[in-house]
Image (cartoon, rainbow, N blue to C red):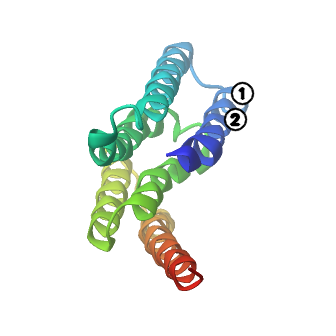
Amino acid sequence: MNLLNRYFAPFAALLILSAVHFGEVEPKQRNLAWGVLIVSAVVNWWLSKNTYRFIGWANRLRTLQIWLTFVWTVPLFYLLHGFWGPMWLLFVMAPVTAALYGTVWSTLGMGLVSSSTMLGIYWLHGVEGEVWWGQIGTQAVFIIVMALFTFLLSQTALKLRDMSR
């Protein structure tokens, strides 16, 4: 989970800060986004700090953190995607994290859940037109492909590590 906190959390914060600063977000949505960001940061910090304290629960805590990453993404994307186009990249975080710690099936499952949720939110917001759906569909496929790529890359690294022993 250190990889999540070291790379993805700052990237998510950058996306959110950019959306709030450049996107002219309305005060209510901005405050809700700040609230979700703060709660997610505190929960992720606590889980990372205590994962090895509860070593018997380490796998469950990792799974919980992966799902919580997805849960934080949904309201943040819902609130801010209309103000900042790159917000869809938040949906890459949970599947890639699942790829680092899970199986190929959990990675694929999280990728499908994330992509489907993103598509559903776009649909709820009334996105229309072939060009928009083409772009959104490409984003959805990217989320899955990136997760599977990361999974295979992590598996290759593990195999190379094991071969060098």
Instruction: Using the image, determine if residue 109 lies above or below residue 34.
Output: below
Q: Would you name the residue on which mark 2 appears?
A: 18
Q: Nearer the viewer, residue 120 or 94?
A: 94
- Taking the image as shown, residue 43 lies to the left or right of residue 6, namely left
Whether residue 62 is visible to the viewer of this picture, yes or no, is yes
- Residue 112 in percent (x, y) is at 30, 64
- Does residue 102 appear to the left or right of 28 in the view shown? left
Mark 2 burial class by Cα count in 10 Å: few <14, some 14-19, many 20+: some
Residue type for callout 2: Ser
Q: Which residue is found at the position 37% from the left and 47% from the top? A: 66
Number of on-image labels: 2
Q: Nearer the viewer, residue 32 or 81?
A: 32
At x 52%, y 41%, the residue is: 81
- Left or right, 2 with respect to 126, comes to right
User: Which amino acid type is marked by label 1?
Assistant: His
Q: Pointer 2 and pointer 1: residues touching (CB < 8 Å)?
A: yes
Rendering coords of residue 68 (x, y %)? 35, 38
| Label 2: which secondary element | helix
Residue at horizontal 39 percent and vertical 31 percent from the top: 53
- Coordinates of residue 34 in the picture (x, y in percent): 54, 20
Q: CA distance from mark 2 to mark 1?
A: 5 Å
Q: Position of residue 91 (x, y in %)?
A: 45, 52
Sort mark 1 into few (<14), some (14-19) or many (20+) by Cα contacts within 10 Å. few
Which one is in front, 54 or 29?
Answer: 54
Label 1, on which residue?
A: 21
Task: Examine the rendering and report whether any part of residue 87 can be seen.
Answer: no
> Based on the displayed image, in which of its 4 quarters is residue 111 positioned?
bottom left
Q: Based on the displayed image, in which of its 4 quarters is residue 20 positioned?
A: top right
